[in-house]
Every structure is written in structure tokens, then in C-alpha cells.
Image (cartoon, coloured by chain):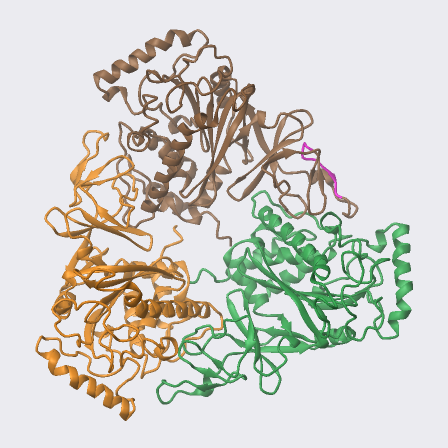
Chain colours: A green, B orange, C brown
Amino acid sequence: MSDREPPPGPELAALVDSRREGHGLPRAFYHGDKLHAAELQAIWHGGWLFVGFAFEMPNPGDFLTLDVDATPVLVIRDDDGAVRAFHNVCRHRGTQLCREPAGQLRAIVCPYHRWTYSRNGALIACQGMHDGIEKSQLGLRPLHAETCSGLIYVSLAATPPAFDGLRERFEAAGKPQGFDRARIAKVIDYDVDANWKLVWENNRECYHCAPCHPQYVKSNFDIYEEEYASAAVRQKIAAAIARTQSKWASPGDAAAHPTGGLATFPDPERDLWYTSNRTALTEGFVTESVDGKRVAPLMGDYEDADVGVLRMRSLPNFWLHASCDHAVATRMLPAGPRKTRMRSYWLVDQDAREGEDYQLDRLLPFWHLTNEQDWDICKWQQKGVDSIGYVPGPLSQRKEYNVDAFIRWYLKQVRA
Amino acid sequence: MSDREPPPGPELAALVDSRREGHGLPRAFYHGDKLHAAELQAIWHGGWLFVGFAFEMPNPGDFLTLDVDATPVLVIRDDDGAVRAFHNVCRHRGTQLCREPAGQLRAIVCPYHRWTYSRNGALIACQGMHDGIEKSQLGLRPLHAETCSGLIYVSLAATPPAFDGLRERFEAAGKPQGFDRARIAKVIDYDVDANWKLVWENNRECYHCAPCHPQYVKSNFDIYEEEYASAAVRQKIAAAIARTQSKWASPGDAAAHPTGGLATFPDPERDLWYTSNRTALTEGFVTESVDGKRVAPLMGDYEDADVGVLRMRSLPNFWLHASCDHAVATRMLPAGPRKTRMRSYWLVDQDAREGEDYQLDRLLPFWHLTNEQDWDICKWQQKGVDSIGYVPGPLSQRKEYNVDAFIRWYLKQVRA
Amino acid sequence: MSDREPPPGPELAALVDSRREGHGLPRAFYHGDKLHAAELQAIWHGGWLFVGFAFEMPNPGDFLTLDVDATPVLVIRDDDGAVRAFHNVCRHRGTQLCREPAGQLRAIVCPYHRWTYSRNGALIACQGMHDGIEKSQLGLRPLHAETCSGLIYVSLAATPPAFDGLRERFEAAGKPQGFDRARIAKVIDYDVDANWKLVWENNRECYHCAPCHPQYVKSNFDIYEEEYASAAVRQKIAAAIARTQSKWASPGDAAAHPTGGLATFPDPERDLWYTSNRTALTEGFVTESVDGKRVAPLMGDYEDADVGVLRMRSLPNFWLHASCDHAVATRMLPAGPRKTRMRSYWLVDQDAREGEDYQLDRLLPFWHLTNEQDWDICKWQQKGVDSIGYVPGPLSQRKEYNVDAFIRWYLKQVRA
């Protein structure tokens, strides 16, 4: 009935099978409401979604809201200090409850008829209803929520995938960064005129970094796959690792990706939808800033600026780069088959004061520029893959192994 | 072929059957082009639509136009003074004929090739056509039109429902208000980002009035169902009725709803799609204005300001509140599944002069504010019912009996 | 899977058959993504499309781009001076290659990963790919391209229709106009809120010219069908022909349509999708300008201003009117079922200098005005044919023979 229903299973399976190994996705994957509905069901309503930071909502009643495509979600800290998530719609007539992006609430009151829910989602008042209403059956529909290393995740699935692996990995990796003692210096929202998969495919390779990100490539070794790099480059990588490895190892921060190129992610065969690693910066860079110089006070447990970059990511909607002095996290949310809403968070130490300890015009440009360069490319790729002239090309085994891995991960989810 | 075709009958029947008694409509009813097409066919192209007032077009050749979703309609007064309605498209190549919202015409001339129709729709000239054209077969396609108590109704149906019941009811109820001796003080058009059914559901209960309309609830007893009201409230209602009943009865205006709460409407079991009633205002209010004081000269036959509020309504697109000194009529037209075009008309006596007898800034706020409060709620409800998290909740038997009645009426039409 | 797939063959055939002979197209032809997809496939991806002028890209590496609905096309002059066309998408990940409407390139470099193609479409570099990539298999996907009398045509079809007929016809007809020695004085782009077929139907008759184009009808005999014209009009036509015929005949420019009304086009029975003819102007007009006076220096081989109007047209997207001193060409491209992108080119002799030899405010108004009048009518016709009240009317055998021919041509393509 709805225009938003997924295609029939056999049709979807045939489409999945039509992908040629080692190549991009066929054209039909990049437009159409029906396929988008299938993706929402399989991926966005199935997996774990990064939604924000625990320090954004420190106190009971603090909340934040977001839209997972057309589904509004409420994340709120309850009276016991736990982070909970609910469908942000009233159980009475379905009105969206909280409209602000963030705020503080004693109770969740529907603006329409004042049905009132506690911060743990229980319906506590619905004056005007007839007798016999079973309030216990009309609490807010709960969603799974988890926090870990300061990150909040939510799942819309009835039975989400196990979260333990991510928790273990991110807590160990994130600890020295002190995400629990951070604050947001700036949030920037971007509307990208492209399918969300194009944004991930862009994220999963640095093949495009030299053409598209002249400032980014100066700071790191992402564009060099050690196996194929020149002797000079290999020497530089080795020097960077040698300089840092012993220093990092003691506090447990050893480089988890001591080579060039991008760490392998995802790993569809082992169902790995999250990972983290630490990489070395190039000579002269102590942080991911335009000139490589520090732009804010040291974060977390760091006592030395030379900590490289901690990278974390989880599918389907999160990645983060953390330097010694700041971190930039990025959240992705689809909004129809041709629009993706991106949000980047610039984090600094909780005690850092704007204007004194850091300046936004030094903090923001590195990633804001990189973001805008990427979203522009994605927009033009969307126009291209919409064409009848598009045929999926070969992915570079040297540089796009992660795009291939993403596609294989994606097809595995959609097929399931 | 078209994307706008209704879904197959069995699919639609299954959807209708999926509604749980006493609860809101399932999610699938609030989005989707196919369901919208089914509604257009069953309801908007089937029933009687309020389109405007007879005094808007007093003379032969006066016309007004409107769009019923994507279908342009022309309403015109013919040479004999009768109100006629036609599909507002040329019988030649289909061009929309009249583009202005209202005006005056000697004949209806298509701007494209000057096919010319008389005010009664007959094709009277089509210079340039070949011999043998049968003009008598190429008149404008007529629509059913009726006027009653100053209101104009049109039906796009081949065989519309009987109009007699509405005529009888509205002529009796509307006579003292003098809709035939009124004029429009102001028209305001609103685009509401919500499905038209949400606007009706909002209209059919005053459960939301206390939270949403603080100014509205002061004037009337809509929020009190007598059966459940406190002794104090019941006493107030009784006092209001006692004060007015004998006075109103003599000119035939007796309160037709001498209790609190909303009069029952619609009545799907008896196929009642129109109704009217008169209600008492609260102490201190002689009209529906912000402070309860008169905002214009008395209308119609009234000789005393204390006449309460005459209310009239008809499905699928009309409601009206008339006080002693002014009336506010509201017309609804769908424009796709997620947009509804609302128009409110503020009527005053035909001799009342703006600036002297009434001021717009005193006349408009009461209903303009109420409108904007309602449209905002509907927009947020649309966002909520679009969510996968929406499940229809129970309707209050005390306060939402009319929402339930509307839903039952709606399902009956769509099923037919 | 895609929402953009054509409807099943039998459904389409039934729709084609539903057209009543001698009447307009049924309503379903004017909206809906599925039918639009069928048209793209049958017509826009099948026939020859006018894309621009050879003199817009005189040198190797000069290029222009356009979008055929959602399909980006690149037209470029190669090293040998030949005009070539390609799908404007990278063979790697599908990114749109050239984004500017026109420009100059040494090589075609994808901005994403610097895959580099020669001007003849060969993949010449894809640094970063793994060994074993067969570059020869990854050249740009070529489209058929032809030039003739200064016009560039492209076809997206694997096997396009024969181009020879058009070439022969247009080269003979266009030679005296000197399209190879012209330049563009002005390009104006128009977005028309109507289906592309409505624009063609509008173009194929001058029945609407008297009501809609008061300035246009002064210049020519288009609105008079000789067979039906008054004696006075016939005499005027005869006089115009007598004045010009002998003079034009010697350089081979004899009037190919020495009567009033529009020349017959298209001819679906003989599969004629292009044609040209020369018509006489009325007394006092030597060019298609508002006052009939010359607005630029003579073009091409003309030595006398009295050359009437050369007209050329080809389906699905080109028409042109050329006077002694300037020519106006119009290109049509669909952009979804309800939007059509029109571009008009005002051409003058290559040596004419703006401000000295011609003034834009004298050159442009005649056709710019005519265009805007037509696009406005098409917009209102779209609104009309979207209505459930639209039924196709009879086409005038006297004045709309070409609309009928266009519809028959169209149905023949779609059925095939």
C-alpha cells in the first residue's frame, strides 16, 4: 500500500546478486524509495546508531532528539542517571513529543493532550481518558540504548546485535582521550545531496585525498599503502612510528595501524561493524589542524602532544578522529534516498574556554574543509550514478579495499 | 499506469480492517500517493464540498475558482442568476480556463485558442475548428452545485449524495445569522503540512483545547463533558442555558446543544455528514473574541448580542462558528497526502465598514490564533505518524467520541 | 525495483490504444514517473538530440555539457577536430566528470580520483589502481555524434536512426544562412512547468498565435491556411511569394512553403522526424523583429535582406527560425514528467559586434516574448490535463493537423 515498502524478497535478492565482484554497486542501489525502505529496515532500523555524547546530557531530564530518516527518536537521562531512548511519539495519537534538538525536562508532556510520561517512559498521566485505560500498556516505546566511552548509541531493532564488542574496543581505545571529560566546541550540520552509501564509500578510501583534500594529506600517511609506497615514504612512516611507538606504548596507546593507508574496515566476513586504531601523524603535525600546530589544550590523560590520531568508527553512522587536543566526531542520518544529514562535533577538553584556550577559526577549518570537499564530491557522484550511462567500475585493490568491504557488508545486511 | 491510482480493492479492504476499534488510524493511512488517490476518489470526488459564499458572486458572470487537490473547479453565476459549477478546463486541449481566484466574466474564453463558453457552460464559439464539430457535445463539463443559506456547495460526483438534508438543516439554523446579508471582512489562507484527516481529527475534539488554546477555552464549555464535569462547572453550564434558553427560544434559536463538550458529529451509522447546533458562551462572553466583547455590529436578524454560537459543519471540508456579530467559516482542500490548504473567512454584516464598525485587529485574533495553534499541532502529528514508532492509541471515550466517529465515517467511505 | 521503470508492455499498449483518433492524448500521458520512463527509453534515449552548435566548440578540447533528463552528456572536440560525445560519468565510481556548461580541456580528468581520459574518450591514466586493469575496456562510454550545417546532434541509442536524411536536408537548407560562420549573441534558459509533449503540441500549431502572440502574427502567414483564407489574405500571400520567388530561386532559396499555415510536420507514416522550409514574411517585415526592421548584419551568403524565414526542426528537441540577419534556435530537454528545460540561442554573423552592429534590446524581444507567452500557456495546460475533469478534445483539422501528426509520431515511438 505504502510507497515506502521494501521490494519483494526475490526482487531484492536478484538485485543483490547483480553486483559484480570487486566493482561498485549497480545503479539501482542509488535511487528509488523501495530500495531505500529495504535499507531502512535492514540497516537503519536494525543496527546500532551513534546519537551523541553522554556529556551533552549530564543530568536527569536532559534530552536530545534526532530523526532516523522519518522516525523521530528521543534520548533522555532518567532519574537514576541512566541514558534511555524512546520513540519520540505519543502513544495516544502519535504526535511527536519533543521538538527541540536538546533540552531539559521534568517529565515528557505531549503538547497535544498533555499525556505525561516519566523520564523512564512510563505513562503517568492521561487526564481526560475514560476509565479502564491501562497506563502500564501505554508507556513510551523503548529503544535500546548504550553508552560507552562517552558515546551514546541507540538501536531501533527489537533485538539489536551484541554491543559488547564495541564497548570493549571503544572503552579501551577511547580512555586516554577522555571523552567523558570533554565538551562540544562546535556542532555543524550539513545536508548532503547524495545517498548515504556514497558518503560511506567516500569515507572508506583515501584514494581521493590527494585530488580532493590537499590540506588533509599533509598531516598523515593515509594515501600511502606501505606495500606500494616509495622507499622515501616507507622511511618516513618508519621514522614516525619509531619516534612514537615506545612513547605511546607505556600508557597503552601504541599505534594500532603502524603503516600507511587506511586500516581495514569493515570486516563483513567476521561481522565487524566497528573498529578503532591509532595512527601516526607526519613530521611537523601534532594535531589535525591546517598547520599541524596545537589548537586547544591537551585532552584526557595525554601529557604529551605527540599521540598521533585515534580513529574510531561504527556502521552505519559514525566516525571520529581524535588528536591530542581535540576530536571531531561525525554522525550520519539518512533522509530519503537522495539526502543525507551529516553532523560534525568538534570536542575539546571540558575546561577549555573559547577565545582563551582555543579559537574556532583555528579549530574548525581542517575538518570543515574536508567535509565540504567530500560532500561536494558525493553530490556529483549522485548525479553520475543516476545516469543511464553509469556502469559500476572496478575498485582499486590497492586503495579501495575498504569500499569493497563496505559494499560486501552492505549487501550482507540487505540480503538478510 | 499512473502513480496516482488507488490500491487494489482487497488491499484497501485489508487496510481498512486493520484498524483497531476505538483507536486511531493505522500508520499507512497517513502517507502514500495510492491511499490518497483512493480518498480522492471516494471522498473528495464523491461528496459535497463547500466552496464559498453566494454573496461573493452576486451578479451574473461573477466567478470563483478553487483546486480540489489537482482538479481545478470553476463556480460562476449564470445569466439567470443561478450558481453553476464546471470543470475549469477547456474541452479542446484541456487548458485551465480561469486562473484568477475570483472575478467577473461576460463569457468564459480559453486563453489558448479562444474557445468560448457561455456562462451556462455551452460552447458558443470555436473559430478555427473544422466543419462538423458538434458544439453541443463540447460544453464545459458540469458539476453539481447547490446554494443554501448563503453557502455554495459543489460535488464532483456523477451522482452526489442527497443535498436536501443539509439544505433543510442549514437554512433553518442559518436564517437568523443572515449569511445572505453578510460580507467578507477578511480571508486568510493557510498551508498546513499535514494530511487532511489529521486536521479533521483535530477539529473533532476539544480534548486538546486546554493545552493548546488558552484563549479559546475561556469562551465556551467545549472542554467540559457534562457527565464528567464538576458540580461547579455543571452549575455554570446550567446558569448559561437558563439565562439564554427562554430568550433564544422565541425567535427559534434555542440552544441545540445545551450541555458541555462537543455535539456528536459525524454519525456514520446514519450517514450524517452535516450538522448544526447552537451553544452557550461563558459568563462575560457575548462573542468569540479574545476579551469576549463585541467586535462588530449585530448580524442578520439578531436584536440582542446574547445568542451564543451557531456552529455548522459538513464533511469533508467545512465548519463555521457564528457569534452575534461575526462568523468564521473554514474550508479545507487537500493538496497531496501531506499538504492541506485551509481558508478561513471572517464574515460581518454587509453594512459594517472596516475602521468604523469593526477593526481587523480585534476581529481576527481569536480564530487566527486558534487556527495557527491547530495547524502547528497537526504538523507535528504528521511527523509522528510517519514514524515506524507510531502505533494507534486509544481514543478517549469521554473526549474523543467524535474523532472515533470521524474515523468510522472515513473508513465507511473508503471501503465503499 | 526502481520507481523509474517503464510500465509493462501490455499496459502501455492499452494506453496507446486508448487515444481517440483526431483527439488529444489521454490524461495518463501527461503525468506519472512510469510513463515518463517509457518515453525516455523510447524517444529521448532513442532518437537524435540537438545539443548545440559546432562554432561553440571550435578547437580541440572545447566541450559542452547537458543533461538529458537525469543523464549527463559530454560533447567534446577531439584532437583531430571531430566532435565526439560521451556519457559524462567516470568509468570508475560513476562521478559526473565535467560540471561546467562549457569550457576547454586538455584531458578529461575525474575530480574524484584523477582517472584521466583523452579527448577521444580513452582511459589514459588511473594511477592507484591495481595491476591488471584493462584500460582499453574502461574508456568513456561513447555516444553517437553528428554535425551538419553547424548543428551538433547526439544520440544515446546503441543503434540510432539513420542521420543521412537530416544531414542532406539541413545542409542544403542551411547553407545560405552560414551557421558555420555564426556566433551566439545570447542564450536564454527557461524552465517550463509542463510536460515536454505539451511544449511540442504548442509548437506544432499557430491556432493559438492570434490569441497569444499579437506581435508574432504580424510578421508571417502562419495563422492563415490558404484553403480557408479570405480572398484578401490569399492575395497578400500570393503577392509576397511573387515578390520573392524569382529572387530567391536563383541562389537556391525558393520558398518551400509558399502558402499560409504551417508546413506539415512530422510525418509519422513516412518516419520523417526532421524537416525544413522557407516561408515569406509579410509586407514590411524583412526579419522576425518586433517592428520587422533589420536588427543585425546579413548572415551567411545573403546579399539581400528579403529572404523570408528559413525554418528547421527535428524531433524530439529542436526548432529554428532564421531570418536574413539572425536566427533563433530552440533546444528542449525533459527534466521529469512535469518540467522541461528550454534553451533559446540567438545567432548572428560571426563578425557582428554587440552595441555596434546589433543591440540586444532589439534582437531579443520578438522570440523572448513569444517564448514566455508559450511557456505560460503550457503551464496552465499542464494544470488542466492533470485534472480528473480533462477529456481530450477534437483537434482542428484546419489548424492542428501537426498536433495530430506529432501525437501519431509520439504514439508510434512509444508503442515500438
Residue B382 pos. (x, y %): 42, 67
* Residue at x 24%, y 80% (from the top left corner): B284
In the displayed structure, C257 sits above or below A203; it is: above
Residue C225 pos. (x, y %): 28, 22
Please say whether residue C123 is one of the residues in the magenta stretch: yes
Of B190 and C412, the residue lying toward us = B190
* Residue at x 38%, y 59% (from the top left corner): B34
**Residue found at the very far bottom of the displayed protein:** B231
Of A103 and A162, the residue lying toward us = A103
Image quarter of the C terminus of chain C: top left
Please say whether residue A91 is one of the residues in the magenta stretch: no
Over which residues does the magenta segment extend? C119-126
| Number of numbered discs overlaid on the protein picture | 0
In the displayed structure, C340 sits above or below B29; it is: above
Of C195 and C410, the residue lying toward us = C195
Where is residue C91, by image quadrant?
top right
* Residue at x 57%, y 25% (from the top left corner): C54
Where is residue A74, by image quadrant?
bottom right
Residue B55 pos. (x, y %): 17, 56
Residue A228 pos. (x, y %): 84, 51
